[in-house]
Amino acid sequence: MAMDLVGDLLARLDQLNAIGAALSKERNTDALLEGILIAAKNITHADGGTLYRMTEDGSALRFEIMRTNSLDIFLGGTTGRPIGFPLLQLVNADGSFNDSMVATYAAIHDRTVNIADAYAEEGFDFSGTRAFDQRTGYRSQSFLTVPMKNHDGEVIGVLQLINAQEPDLGRVVTFSEADQRLVESLASQAAIALSNRQLIIQLEELFESFIHLINMAIDDKSPYTGGHCNRVPELTMMLADAVDATEDGPLASFKMTERDRYELKIAGLLHDCGKISTPVHVVDKATKLQTLFDRIALVDTRFEVVRRDLEIAALKRQLALRPSVDPVAEAVAAAACTTEQAALDQEREFIRKLNRGTEYFNEGTVAQLQSLSERRRWSGPQGPDLPFFTDDEVENLSIRRGTLTAKERDIINYHIVATNRMLEQVPWPKHLRNVPEFAGGHHERMDGRGYPKGLMRHEMSLQARMLGIADIFEALTAADRPYKPGMKVSKALEIMVRFKKNGHIDPDLFDVFMNRAVYRRYAERFLDSGQMDVVPPAALEPAAE
C-alpha cells in the first residue's frame, strides 16, 4: 500500500514537472489559464475548479475559467463562453476586508485554505455555493483554495478546486496534504508563467505603441503617407495568410507560426519608418511646380500680366488713333489683341496640364515646352523683357512622368536607406531578427534592378517579396495621394501583370494574390466602392510563360 502511495506521488510529481514545462511555452493567455486549471484538477483528481485573476486595480477577483466535469460546465478560457458572475470584491463597503468568501480570504491573506466540507465549515459564507447546489443538484463538499503569486510576491490570482475524488471509486474526499503541496507548487509555477506571459504582452504592446508613434509622426508630417503605413501591413498579412493556406504549387511548403506572423506584422508596420526623415515638401509634392506651395500660381500671375499688357497695348494703339477717328484700324488692333490673348490662354492651359503630372508626355511635348520657354517673355518688378520661366520651373515641367525630379526621387528613395539604417540599430530579439530584412527589401525587384541593394529574387526572403507586392498595390489604389485619384482595381492589376512579366514582382506570389482574390478582400475593406470594378481576364493569366 505504501509503495502504491509513493508511486502515485512520484507519478504526480513527474506530471507536475511536465505541466510546468508546458506552461512556460504557452503563448496564448486563455490557453495558459485553462491549462493551469486542468492541470490542477488532474493531479488532485478534483471534479471541479475555478481560476480567478486579480483585476488591474487590485480591488477584486474576476472569474476567468470554470470547469465541473460531472455537470459538463466549461466556461471561460478558450471556450468563448463568458462567465456571468460578478467580481468578488476584496474590500467591503465599510472598508473592512471581505474575509467571508474563501477565494477573497486566500487572496487577501496570501494563505491556502483547505476545507473538508463546506456545509460544516464555519467562518465562511457558502450561501452562494448552497444556492448553486440547490439549482443544479450538485453537492459541493471539499475545497482547496490556493493564492497565485508572481515574482514580486504579489497575489495575481486564486486557484480553487472542488470535490477531490478518490481514484477508481469516485467518492468525494478531502484534499490531502500532498494534494495541497502539489497545487501550491503548481500555483507558484503557473503564476510565474502567467506573469511572464503578461510581461511579454506588455512589452509587445509598448513596442507596438512606439511603432505607432513613429507612424503618427509620419502621418502628422504628411496625411498622404500615414494611411499607407497602416494599410500595407494589413495587405501583407492578407497575402501571407493566403500563401500559408496554399496546398499546391511552388509555395505549398510555406507555413507560418504565430511568431512568424508577428515578425512579419512588425516588419510591415516599420517598412516606411525612414520617411520620418524625408522632407515634407517632397513627400507631399502634388504637382511638378510644387515646393512649399504650388508655383503654378506664380506662372498664372505672369500669364495674367502678359494678358493685361496685351490689352493695355491694344488700348494704347486705339487711343493713338482717336484723333484720326479710324474705326477700322481700332478693330484691327482689338482683333490682334484677342488673337494674342487666345494664344496666351492656350499656352497657360498647356502649362497647367503639364504641371499636373498625371500623363506621360513625349519628345514633341518637351520641344513645345522648350520653345515656349525661349519665346515667351514678360515685364515684372525686376524689369522688362524677362524670361517667362525660371530654369528650375523648366526642369520641373520637363518631368516625363509623375511630379518628382530625379533629385527629388532620390530623396524619396532614400527613405528605404534610412529605414534600413534605423532598423539595423535595434537590438532585435531572436523572434524578430528578420524584421530589417523583411522591411528593407520591399523596393527590390526580382531582376536585381530595385533599390537600395539591387538584390535578385533568390537573395530575398519570401516575406520581403510579399511586402513588395503589398506596397505596390496599395500605392496604385490609394485614394489619399496628393498627385492622383485612387486607381481602379482592374487598372492596378493590369499594371501588376506587366510587373510580373518584366521581373519587377514575384510571379508565384502574384498568382496567389490573384487566384485567392487577396486584392478583392483588400478592396472590400479599404477602397471606395467605385474602385472595385470587373477584373479583366488578362489579369488572371498563370505565372508560367
Image (spheres, grey):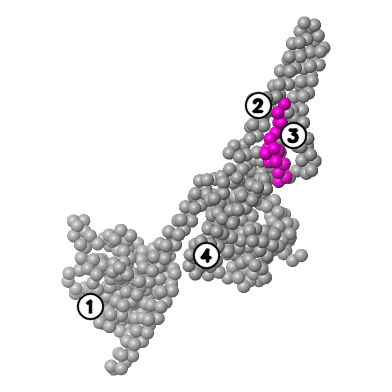
Q: Which residue is mark 4?
A: 263
Residue 359 in the figure: left or right of residue 124? right
Q: Which segment is the magenta one?
A: 385-401
Q: Which mark is residue 373?
A: 3
Q: Is residue 22 above or below residue 246?
A: below
In this rendering, which labeled residue sits more in front, label 3 or label 2? Answer: 2
Q: Nearer the viewer, residue 290 or 132?
A: 290
Amino acid on which the number 4 mark rests in the picture: Glu
Q: Is residue 527 above or below residue 236?
A: above
Q: Earlier in the sequence, mark 3 or mark 2?
A: 3
Q: Secondary structure at mark 2?
A: loop
**Residue 476 in sight here:** yes
Mark 3 and mark 2: span between their CA atoms?
18 Å
Q: Which residue is mark 1?
A: 116
Check if mark 1's residue and mark 2's residue have beta carbons within 8 Å.
Answer: no
Secondary structure found at label 3: helix
User: Percent from the top left, x then y, of residue 204?
Assistant: 44, 62
Which quarter of the picture shows residue 52? Answer: bottom left
**Residue in view at x 27 percent, y 83 percent:** 178
The quadrant the N terminus occupies is bottom left
| Residue 508, x across and y down, in percent | 68, 65
Q: Is residue 522 magenta?
A: no
Identify the residue shown where x is 71% and y is 61%.
503
Residue 231 at what x, y percent from top left?
56, 54
Q: Which residue is mark 2?
A: 382
- Does any portion of residue 158 appear in the rendered image? no
